[in-house]
Image (tube, grey):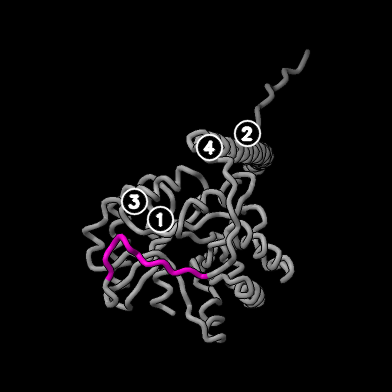
Amino acid sequence: MMTKRKPTSHRKPTSSSKKSAQSKWRSYLLFGLIGFFILSLFAGMAGFIGYEIAREKVSRDYYDQISAYRHEIDVLEDRVRILSMKLDEKAEQSTDRSFKVIPPTIHYPTASDHTQDRDRPKLAIIIDDVSFPSHVRAIRALPLHVTPSFFPPTKRHPKTPELAQQLQHYMIHLPMEAMHYNHPEDRTLTVTSSEAEMADMMDQLRDWFPRAHFINNHTGSRFTADRPSMEKFYHVAKRYGFVFIDSRTTAKTVVPALMRSYQEPYIARDVFLDNKADVNYIHTQLKKAVQIARTKGYAIAIAHPRRMTFKALASAQPILKGVDVVYIDELYKKIR
């Protein structure tokens, strides 16, 4: 007779086995989180690197495009200058007229067509950058005695000596080295220019502009702040009968100290008239120049051959009632 087997009883899991299972799940979860974090980190780094590479490429492309645009602008500016020269030359009937070289004598003509009082304040207005026949025509049309300052001739403006010979009063706008300027004129004087190179330039200037007595600087913030360069220039310019007028393109100019050391009068720009192409602004600057002239007896203002500048000067008579607007050589007599 077979013995009846007792049914197998199911043992309840112990607390230790439960803890072991939970520990495994925690481990899996922890490893999963760590893996997810590492993958996210790598994905983030890959995305960042990709972004940086893309940004660098875009930046490089952007600057390349900007450089290309700047080059195109320079080319267009040159074309505009050339076209302007051609148009002006066609309008002028005497473009091929030769000019006679006159010995370098200092001439102080009287202002016969307007009345001056010896004791009234004097204001000289210099028009820089004069280069083309249209500039000369606009200057001649003004009801004021302004002094044009001509660039030396270059391929951009080759006719400046001939244009100057059409006028009785003029001076020379000589390019000098600047601290920060990317488009210097041809044959700009630099701090590395030798005395012989400066003398060669003065000799040519005397041939080109035989009646000129005054020179002012175009740019020149580096050159006029360099004492050795200005020492050389002062002696060479004086040898050729030139007087330097400081355009004051830098607060660090050494010209005042240089002139004091040689007991010469320091002649300099007091006001820039047209830093903004706005008639009201230019009139405000003219009022400042008039006030300076009333305070010290004279003043020098500098402007440029621009449409708004000529418009402002043409309508400035009420502002200028208290001063005599004179040519620079007439003002020099008062200073000297």
Q: What is the distance, in whole Å, between disc 4 and disc 2 at their CAs?
A: 114 Å
Residue at image mark 4: 89
Q: Residues within 10 Å of mark 3 (few under 14, many from 20)?
A: some
171 and 301: which one is in front?
171
Image quadrant containing the N terminus:
top right
Q: Residues within 10 Å of mark 1 (few under 14, many from 20)?
A: few
Secondary structure beneath dot 3 equals: loop
Secondary structure beneath dot 1 equals: loop
Vertical side of 178 occupied by 20: above or below: above
Residue 80 found in image quarter: top right
61 and 235: which one is in front?
235
Which stretch is magenta?
106-116
The disc, 1 or 2, on the residue closer to the chain's N-terminal end is 2
Q: Nearer the viewer, mark 1 or mark 3?
A: 3
Q: Nearer the viewer, mark 2 or mark 3?
A: 3
Q: What is the distance, in whole Å, between disc 2 and disc 3 at their CAs?
A: 115 Å
Callout 4, which amino acid? Glu
The disc at residue 12 is: 2
The dominant secondary structure in magenta is loop
Q: Residue furthest right?
A: 1
Residue 320 found in image quarter: bottom left
Callout 3, which amino acid? Leu
The disc, 1 or 3, on the residue closer to the chain's N-terminal end is 3
Residue at image mark 1: 275
Q: What is the distance, in whole Å, between disc 1 and disc 4 at their CAs?
A: 29 Å
Residue at image mark 3: 142
The disc, 3 or 4, on the residue closer to the chain's N-terminal end is 4
Q: What is the distance, in whole Å, between disc 1 and disc 3 at their CAs?
A: 20 Å
